[in-house]
Amino acid sequence: MNRLEGKKNMLTEKIKKLSEDFYGEMVSLRHQIHENPEIGFEEFQTAQLIMDTLERYGIEYQSGIAKTGILGTIKGKNPGKTILLRADMDALVLQEETNLLYASKVPNKMHACGHDGHTAGLLGVAMILNSLKDFFEGTVKLMFQPAEETEGGALPMIEEGILENPKVDAAFGCHLWGNTPEGKVEICHGSMMAACDHFELEIKGVGGHGAMPHLTIDPITIASYTITMLQSVVSRRIDPLESAVLTIGSIKGGEVNNVIPDSVKVTGTVRTLNEAIHEQIPREIENVIKGICSTYGATYDFYYKREFPVLINDSSMTNLAGQAFSKIVGEENVRELEKPYMGGEDFAYLAQRVPSSFIYIGISKDMDHPILQHSSKFQFDDKNLKTLSQGLVQVAIDFLEESASN
């Protein structure tokens, strides 16, 4: 081992030691956040806890970004590149059924996806990096983001300037992940999570008596044909080598058994991993709707909303993340994700603007019974906060060191 490698190994050991030193505080913060869950753009108590923690360690921050977002800043010993590390803060509308000692105290609200761990873990990152300011050059921005589970807080925070002054050169985020074994870390080159859209459709017919359907334009029958034919958009209009999901989530129309209603409402979601397909699918959906409604004499209102874009990881940043986490958990415990996940993630907006990578940190002890995100029984071991905090600190140190040497 040469002198430089020895120095790097010593720094990694220092990161691990500091993580142990701050572990109790990270756990306490996680439990406080878990007990007091807040949904999108209502994370005022969580934001205050973050601000109190940053102030206690003398870390500068901006607050009130996109309503509840916080941006912490840690500067190294000399100017250099800037890296952004992100955590989401919001909970879900869900009644907790875990029996944890720190279970949610708020009826019908729960941290069922791991965002309490993301936030506490990033606060741990802040504590560790603040102790290591003399060991790196450049700036680390710490993004505490609202509303990932709903309309998304990443884009509003970007629009309010978090990637500027100083300009961010790269961004990284982690997700505590129930489909990955505890102790394992998964990286992904290229498309990792899907573009996530939703649509609303109202089919307008002419209602009437159920015994005289010939005098009506039956929106229930038309909606049934439409839903069936919409499945052909993926099976017959999209290249079978491409991934796409079109799911109908609700259909509502009529009140009683013998009355044909005037209208039927249908809602659905679309997930894609290719931007060209992302653009194509709304047109194909409306072509199906228009054709069927025209055939049967109905009219329609169609609303399609693009939510999060495809999350596409930068190859070089993913290599860096994999190498950094290998120093923490061992090279044998870092692996490539087998296939993308069709869920959405608004970290994608960061990845559109700066070279970025998103990482899964495993939390399941038994892969025969993986931990289900968005479940009322969702829970994970606090010790996974160490992997998250240590890994992101190592990513930041490695990126800034590599940038300083180039």
Image (cartoon, grey):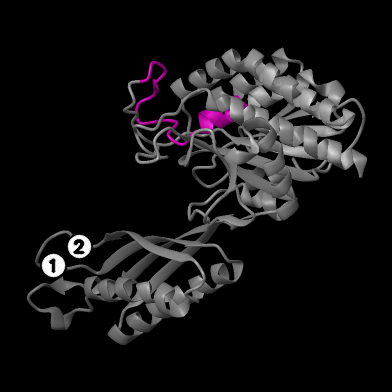
Residue that protrudes farthest toward the bottom in the picture: 295
Instruction: Tell me which amino acid carries mark 1.
Output: Val
The location of residue 107, given as percent across then percent down, is 35, 26
Residue 112 in the magenta stretch? The answer is: yes
For the residue pair 174 and 258, the one nearer the viewer reads as 174
Q: Which mark is residue 352?
A: none
Secondary structure beneath dot 1 equals strand
The location of residue 380, given as percent across then percent down, is 45, 28
Residue 390 in the magenta stretch? The answer is: no
In the displayed structure image, the side of residue 377 where residue 258 appears, left or right: left
The secondary structure making up most of the magenta span is loop
Where is residue 333, by image quadrant?
top right
Task: Identify residue for label 2.
Answer: 254
Where is residue 277, by image quadrant?
bottom right
For the residue pair 400 and 247, the one nearer the viewer reads as 400
Q: Quadrant of the N terminus?
A: top right
In the displayed structure image, the side of residue 367 where residue 325 appears, left or right: right
Residue that protrudes farthest toward the front in the picture: 1
**Would you call the spot at circle 2 few (<14 residues within 10 Å), some (14-19), or many (20 or more)?**
some
> Which span is picked out in magenta?
100-121
Task: Identify residue for label 1.
Answer: 259
The location of residue 38, given as percent across then percent down, is 48, 30
Gap between marks 1 and 2 measured at Cα: 7 Å
Which of the two labelled residues, at mark 1 and mark 2, occupies the earlier sequence position?
Answer: 2
Any part of residue 37 in sight: yes
Instruction: Tell me which amino acid carries mark 2.
Output: Gly
Q: Are marks 1 and 2 in contact (CB under 8 Å)?
A: yes
Q: Residue at x 48, y 76 (%)?
A: 238
Q: Residue at x 33, y 76 (%)?
A: 229
